[in-house]
Amino acid sequence: METDHPGIRFFYLLIDLLLLNLAVFIVFQFSPVHDYMDVPRRNLYYLHANISGIIAYTLYGKRNFFFTDKYRYRLRIISIRFLVLIITLFALGEIFLPKGYHRVFLLEYVAFFFLFKVVVFYFIYQLHRYRYAKGYSFNRVVILGANNSSRVIGKILNNNPTLGFKLVGYISDKGNGAGEDLLGGLTELPALAKDHEINMIFVTNPKYFTLKNTKGLLALCNKTGLRVRYILMNGYWNKCMYRKVESARFFEMFNPQQIPLDDLTLRLKKRAFDVVFSSAVILFIFSWLLPLLSIIIKLNSKGPVFFVQQRTGINNKTFNCIKFRTMKVNHEADTKQAVKNDNRITSIGNFLRKYNIDELPQFFNVLVGNMSVVGPRPHMLKHTEQYSALIEYYKVRHFVKPGITGWAQVNGYRGLTDELWKMQKRVEYDMEYLENWNFLWDIKIIVMTLIGKNAYKNAM
C-alpha cells in the first residue's frame, strides 16, 4: 500500500464529510439545547460546514505514522484536527453565515462530529488490528540492514497495520550481525524468502541507491520473486531512535520495480471490473450451467464435481484454484500435466477442456479476490518450483494476480509445456502484460478468449 495515496486521503475525507453532515442534521432535528427547526437558510449552514471541513482537512490531513500501537496517540492527532476544524468554522462563519448566526449551533454539531469520528475511527483501527493479527491483506516484509534507520522503519511497520505490511525480521548486508530478529545475510535471501514466506524487502541503506548496486539487488529479488521498496531516509529518522517521538508525517517509498498495477487507483479499477464481471457470469451463466454439468460429470465418472488444486498466486502466496473435474480421480493430478490422448481425461472432460469450460468455477476465485479475470495463468506448485529454477525471472509473473485467461493464452501458449521454450514464451508474454497493463488490454484479451482462434489452440 502506498503510504499517503491521494485516493486514500480522499476516502478518509469523504468519511469526515459524511460524519460532519450527519452531525449537522442531528443537531438541526434533535438538538438538546435549542430548537433550530425554524432557522432560515439551513442549506447555507450545510455549505459552510462542508467548505470548512475540506479546508481543515487540507490544512491538517496528511497521514501520520505511529511509533507505538496505542489508540490514545491517534486520538491526540484527531483532537488536533478537531481544533483546526473549530478555528476554520468560526473564521468562515464570520464571512459566510448571516449576522447573529447561532454560534452555539456550531459548537453542538462539532461536538457530535468529534464523538462520531472517535467511535468510527476506533472501529476502523480495531478492524485493521484484527485483520493484521489474522494475516489478512498484508505483505510479509524483511528489512535490509539492522541499523538505526532500519529499526525506526521496523517500529512504524509494527505499529501501523493500515499500511498493510508485516515485519518478519531483518537481514544483514554485511554477512554478520546478531539479534533475535536478524534472519541471516543477503546471500541467503532466496532460502529465507521461502522459509519465512517473505514477499517484499525494504531497503534503507543509501549504498543500494547506486545504479550498480541497484542492478545487483533487483536481479536477486526478481529471481526470488520479491518486491523491493527503497525507503528514502534523512537525518530526522535517525534522531527518532533517541527522542520521545509518537508519530511522524514523512514516510517516502520508492518503487524501482514499478508496474502499472502498483498504482492503487488502477488496482481498484481492475478489482471493480473483476467483481462486476465475475458476479455477472456466476449469476447469469453459472447458475443454470452448474446443475447441468454436475449431473453430467457425476454420471460420466466417479468422483467430485469440482477439482481443487493449490496453485501459486500473487506475491507467491498459494491458494485453492477451483475447476470442473475433467479427469478420473488419480494420484498424479498435482504433479503430472495432461498430455495428448491422456487416458485420465474423461469423455466429458475432453469437451470441457477444449472450450475452456472447466475454468468457469474460477470466477468464484475472482470474486473472493484470489484471481483476476485477466492475468498470468496460475501454475501448480510443482511447476513454480521447477520453472523458477530454470527461467531467471519466472517469479516476476507473480507480481500481479493470476487470471482465468491471459495474454499468453490468447496467443496460443497454453496446454502442455513438455519443452522449456514453451514455458519461456509464456513468461515472455506474461512479462509484457504486467509491464504494460491497461484496462482496455484486459477487454481485448477477454474478446480474444471468446472469439479468437489461438485461445483454443493446444487445448487438451
Image (tube, rainbow, N blue to C red):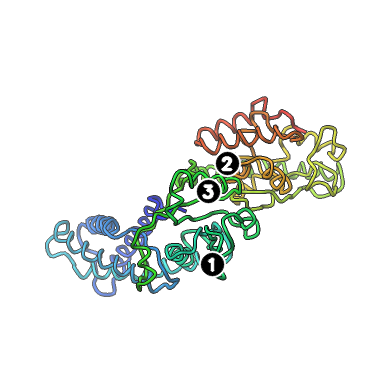
Q: Earlier in the sequence, mark 2 or mark 3?
A: 3
| Observer able to see residue 8 | yes
Label 1: few (<14), some (14–19) or many (≥20) C-alpha neighbours in 10 Å? few
Instruction: Look at 26% across and 70% down and name the residue there.
Output: 108
Helix, strand or loop at label 1? It is: helix
Helix, strand or loop at label 3? It is: helix
Q: Nearer the viewer, mark 2 or mark 3?
A: 3
> Which amino acid type corresponds to the residue marked 1 in the rendered image?
Tyr
Label 3: few (<14), some (14–19) or many (≥20) C-alpha neighbours in 10 Å? some
Look at mark 2 in the image and give the residue it sits on: 277
Look at mark 3 in the image and give the residue it sits on: 217
**Residue 407 image label:** none
| Observer able to see residue 401 | no
Return the x and y of residue 52 as percentages of the image width and height: 24, 58
Look at mark 1 in the image and give the residue it sits on: 130
Instruction: Look at 59% across and 50% down and name the residue there.
Output: 315
Tell me the distance, in whole angstroms, between the alpha carbons under discs 2 and 3. Answer: 39 Å
Instruction: Look at 54% across and 39% down and name the residue there.
Output: 434
> Which amino acid type corresponds to the residue marked 3 in the rendered image?
Leu
Closest to the observer, 69 or 210 = 210
Looking at the rendered image, the quarter that the C terminus falls into is: top right
Return the x and y of residue 210 as percentages of the image width and height: 43, 46
Closest to the observer, 315 or 19 = 315
Q: Quick check: 334 left or right of 200?
A: right
